[in-house]
Image (spheres, helix red, strand yellow):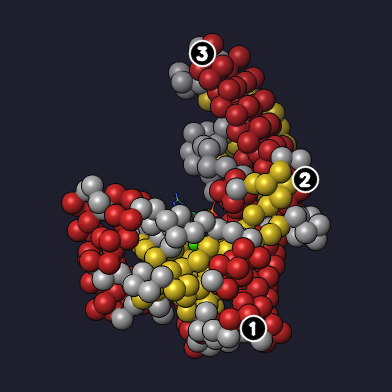
Amino acid sequence: QVEKLYRAGEIIMRQGEPGECAYFMQSGRVEIVLERPDGSEIEVGRRGPGTLIGEMAIVDDGPRSATVRALEDCRLLEISKADFSRAVSNANPIVGLVTKLILMRYRDILQRSENVREFAGVTTMLEQQERYHAEESRVLDAVRMANEFKVAVVRKELFLEYQPFIEIDTGRIVGFEALMRWNHPKTGRMRPDLFIPMAEDTGLIIEATRWAFREACKTLKRMITQTGDSALFISVNFSAQDFDDPAFLDELLFTLHETGIHPTQIHLEITERLLLRQSEGVKKILQQCREHEMQIAIDDFGTGYSSLSYLHQYPVSTLKIDQSFVRNMTTDKGVLGLVKSILSLSENMGLAIIAEGVETQQHVEMLQTLKCRVAQGYFFARPMPEHEAASLLAG
Ligand code: C2E
Ligand code: CA
Ligand code: CA
Ligand code: CA
């Protein structure tokens, strides 16, 4: 932790400027003042040893709400935003959300009293209040949901559905994607779009993904036993946060071993966004997954804002063309061109292709003409529970 010294009279932080850290006061005294547009100041408080100043900066990106000046020589301990959020997220996801909420309320009160004291119009005050209340109820909802999700795995409220990948020319099932569902005790079956973002924000996704991976492997094992098709594969969705787990690879390998699944039968679906992070850590994990012969598929391919240049830096094996391209390629020449270039790119790079969101006969025919081999979508089948997938496999 960095200790900073300020002389009497020095400005420690200035109102309106961006803040990256808070300070814990070790010794000395400071005054907190609000600066008026005309340059005059109002003192709103004083602080001494053992107190925290500039704490807002470590929870949001707002500017400093006041100026702080040293009245005597001060020793301050710096708490950076990065350190703080790391500590909070390591501590407990709920603590993180609640901390954010409490500090938001505090800033709200501060802002309101400022507005009253100063000249700000009634409308901006109301607007601000509304903004805070919307944000506050969003955070509260997330806290509530996070609390419920925390126990969802142990209470067996999570389950997987399986959507087949089809070889277009033969109609044969070559694999399945595992998709997570939450049977919420109050609201019933919940779509992943509604809970995955929260699970990602809170880090709870890591445990859910572990569970999903294990579950998917066990299902695949049963499917292989049933069909004798040892080339059948299963695709599992991973979030960026999963890669922050130091035990990531060991967990995967352990589960594969335990369930008796060969790594070539596993596809890890990740998004372009993860690759855009350009993290050496992620790169290394993906390389290790490839060395262990797992397959890596880029989900929603084409929707990231990337140039394609980063692709070759990663050990990718499959591109999944995003649904929006498949949907629009029949009516939009530009989109068709894009799909064609993804296909020729994949051929040049030796990558497999899967077209997502195939809904009509027309989509199928066009993909056939374009020599896209494998597809997934409502035209063939919707995601379904394991027993239905099994009877589909039985033909
Ligand atoms: P995704 O990975 O891109 O999955 C494809 C989504 O499109 C699925 O929605 C699937 O049901 C839907 N879909 C498949 N075929 C068609 C089609 O022909 N037309 C249309 N309109 N939709 C189709 P779902 O199951 O609601 O999942 C939504 C997203 O939630 C997934 O998008 C994925 O990003 C995320 N997700 C689902 N399961 C998991 C999981 O286990 N872990 C993580 N990290 N994310 C997951
Ligand atoms: Ca996916
Ligand atoms: Ca997708
Ligand atoms: Ca998606």
Which x, y percent locates residue 196? Answer: 60, 53
Q: Nearer the viewer, residue 15 or 384?
A: 384
Is the C-beta separation of discs 1 and 2 under 8 Å?
Answer: no
Q: Nearer the viewer, residue 373 or 196?
A: 373
**Identity, as a three-letter code, of the amino acid under mark 2:** Pro
According to the picture, the residue beneath numbered tag 2 turns out to be 185
Q: Mark 1 to mark 2: distance in Å?
A: 34 Å
Query: What residue is drawn where x is 24% and y is 78%?
Result: 348
Which x, y percent locates residue 294? Answer: 51, 82
Query: What residue is drawn where x is 71% and y is 40%?
Result: 187
Is the CB of the residue bearing disc 2 within 8 angstroms of ligand 1? no
Look at the numbered disc 3 and give the secondary structure of its residue. Answer: helix
**Identity, as a three-letter code, of the amino acid under mark 1:** Thr
According to the picture, the residue beneath numbered tag 1 turns out to be 225
Which x, y percent locates residue 112? Answer: 62, 21
Label 1 neighbour load within 10 Å: few <14, some 14-19, many 20+: few
According to the picture, the residue beneath numbered tag 3 turns out to be 123
Label whose residue precedes the other's in the sequence (3 or 1): 3
Quadrant (top left, top right, bottom left, bottom right) of the C terminus: bottom right
Q: Mark 3 to mark 1: distance in Å?
A: 67 Å
Look at the numbered disc 1 and give the secondary structure of its residue. Answer: helix
Look at the numbered disc 2 and give the secondary structure of its residue. Answer: loop
Quadrant (top left, top right, bottom left, bottom right) of the N terminus: bottom right
Q: Mark 3 to mark 2: distance in Å?
A: 41 Å
Residue 278's disc number: none
